Image: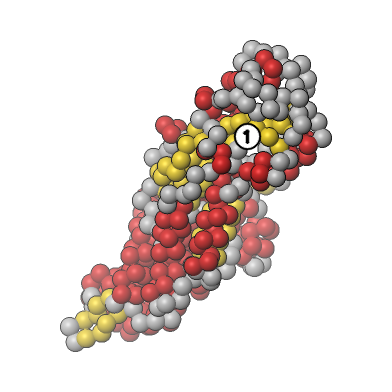
């Protein structure tokens, strides 16, 4: 996990800040929190130091949030709304002191241990000693009153409750990080971070162009791009490790906590090397395709489902190579008469350079919708909103769309 300002954050101080922001008075917040007014004042000073700016307008009538304070307040309110689910989901609401005892270390260590499936790797990610990570995790289990991590062979796996609390913690930490980004943005420090997940189709021309446009306008922005299978990327999105995911729509199979923004329609093509016996031939049939050896994606992927549907009960005469590696696919096609089924966007450069060709066969049944997946109710930062605008703006017609 990357180091961030939230590493120095104190959850109790942040909660006191939201109390003062809600009540407009340190005195009223002190009464509500059961604290002395000097303790509340110290907490507010600590939070303003953390954000490196004043968050309130102070007057005789009380304390009102300024613009930076409103930005921080909105994010932190969302963060604590998420953290209250830990109380509800775990039954920890029985403990009156739960909120005061929950710490940033609890959240960070649980997220790290669940994501790395081990205490040693989590400690390395957090730059902490392994016993420190053990202690924080076990302390949270005592606080919650239930096991969160269990050994499974050589790894440590989360229990169902541990998985859910790690998800909530990850989302809460991302809201806190966004609070710092929003406040910095208001102060003219145009930086921020976007974490993206992309399936192979989107990594060819869509994302590079969009990321390039974003960074041209925001040279201090950071972009993290994660490549993995859909289930891994979706889990990261649900846990707050990703801000958005670009790939094929899952339609009716989508869970309620994920929403989709439709971008365009895409379909698959059959590719071969330049000079292949079928290259340039008109009106190619499925029977003709079945006479050649093939490269297909792994079972369980949407493109493999399309591949299996195309050939149905036909018995392919030669063995099938299963891979999703574009480097391997490109090399195998170049040295043989093998064929593959891919979006033309994935092989854009190879087709433009004349290395590979799309065969003359229409595959309307392979049409699919390409979309951006986001968390339902997600509130993007300014940088994230700008990136979404770039992704969704009309683009020049792609060469693959014209044919």
Q: Residue at x 73, y 43 (%)?
A: 327
**Residue where numbered disc 1 is placed:** 342
Q: Number of callouts in the render?
A: 1
Please provide percent x and percent y for residue 144: 46, 54
226 relative to 44 in the view: left or right: right
93 relative to 355 in the view: left or right: left
The answer to whether residue 195 shows anywhere in this view is no
347 relative to 65 in the view: left or right: right
* Depth order, front residue of 213/102: 213
* Depth order, front residue of 257/384: 384
User: Is residue 366 placed above or below 227 in the rendered structure?
Assistant: above
Q: Secondary structure at mark 1?
A: strand
Quadrant for residue 302, please give it: top right
Quadrant for residue 69, please give it: bottom left
Please provide percent x and percent y for residue 313: 64, 12
Please provide percent x and percent y for residue 66: 29, 77
User: Is residue 386 placed above or below 395 in the rendered structure?
Assistant: below
Please provide percent x and percent y for residue 26: 27, 79
Please identify the quadrant where the C terminus is shown.
Answer: top right
Q: Residue at x 35, y 60 (%)?
A: 78
User: Is residue 16 placed above or below 257 in the rendered structure?
Assistant: below
* Depth order, front residue of 331/359: 359
């Amino acid at each position: 996990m990357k180091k961030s300002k939230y590493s120095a954050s104190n959850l109790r101080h942040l909660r006191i800040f939201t109390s003062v922001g809600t009540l407009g008075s340190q005195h009223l917040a002190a009464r509500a929190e059961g604290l002395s007014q000097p303790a509340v004042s110290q907490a507010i000073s600590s939070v303003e130091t953390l954000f490196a700016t004043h968050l309130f307008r102070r007057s005789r009538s009380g304390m009102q949030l300024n613009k930076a304070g409103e930005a921080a307040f909105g994010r932190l309110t969302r963060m604590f709304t998420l953290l209250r689910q830990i109380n509800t989901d775990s039954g920890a609401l029985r403990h009156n002191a739960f909120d005061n005892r929950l710490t940033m270390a609890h959240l960070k260590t649980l997220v790290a241990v669940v994501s790395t499936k081990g205490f040693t790797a989590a400690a390395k990610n957090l730059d902490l000693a392994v016993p420190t990570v053990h202690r924080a995790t076990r302390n949270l289990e005592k606080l919650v009153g239930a096991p969160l991590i269990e050994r499974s062979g050589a790894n440590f796996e989360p229990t169902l409750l541990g998985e859910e609390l790690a998800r909530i913690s990850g989302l809460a930490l991302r809201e806190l990080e966004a609070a710092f980004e929003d406040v910095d943005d208001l102060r003219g420090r145009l930086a921020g971070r976007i974490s993206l997940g992309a399936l192979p189709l989107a990594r060819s021309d869509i994302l590079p162009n969009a990321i390039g446009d974003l960074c041209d306008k925001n040279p201090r922005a950071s972009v993290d791009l994660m490549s993995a299978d859909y289930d891994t990327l979706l889990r990261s999105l649900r846990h707050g490790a990703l801000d958005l995911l670009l790939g094929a729509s899952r339609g009716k199979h989508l869970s309620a906590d994920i929403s989709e923004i439709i971008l365009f329609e895409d379909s698959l093509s059959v590719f071969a090397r330049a000079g292949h016996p079928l290259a340039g031939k008109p009106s190619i049939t499925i029977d003709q395709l079945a006479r050649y050896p093939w490269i297909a994606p792994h079972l369980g992927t949407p493109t493999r489902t399309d591949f299996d549907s195309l050939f149905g009960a036909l018995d392919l005469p030669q063995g099938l190579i299963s891979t999703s590696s574009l480097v391997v696919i490109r090399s195998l096609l170049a040295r043989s008469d093998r064929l593959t089924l891919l979006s033309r966007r994935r092989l854009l450069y190879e087709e433009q350079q004349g290395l590979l060709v799309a065969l003359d066969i229409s595959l309307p049944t392979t049409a699919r919708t390409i979309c951006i997946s986001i968390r339902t109710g997600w509130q993007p930062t300014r940088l994230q909103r700008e990136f979404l605008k770039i992704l969704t703006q009309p683009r020049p017609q792609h060469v693959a769309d014209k044919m």
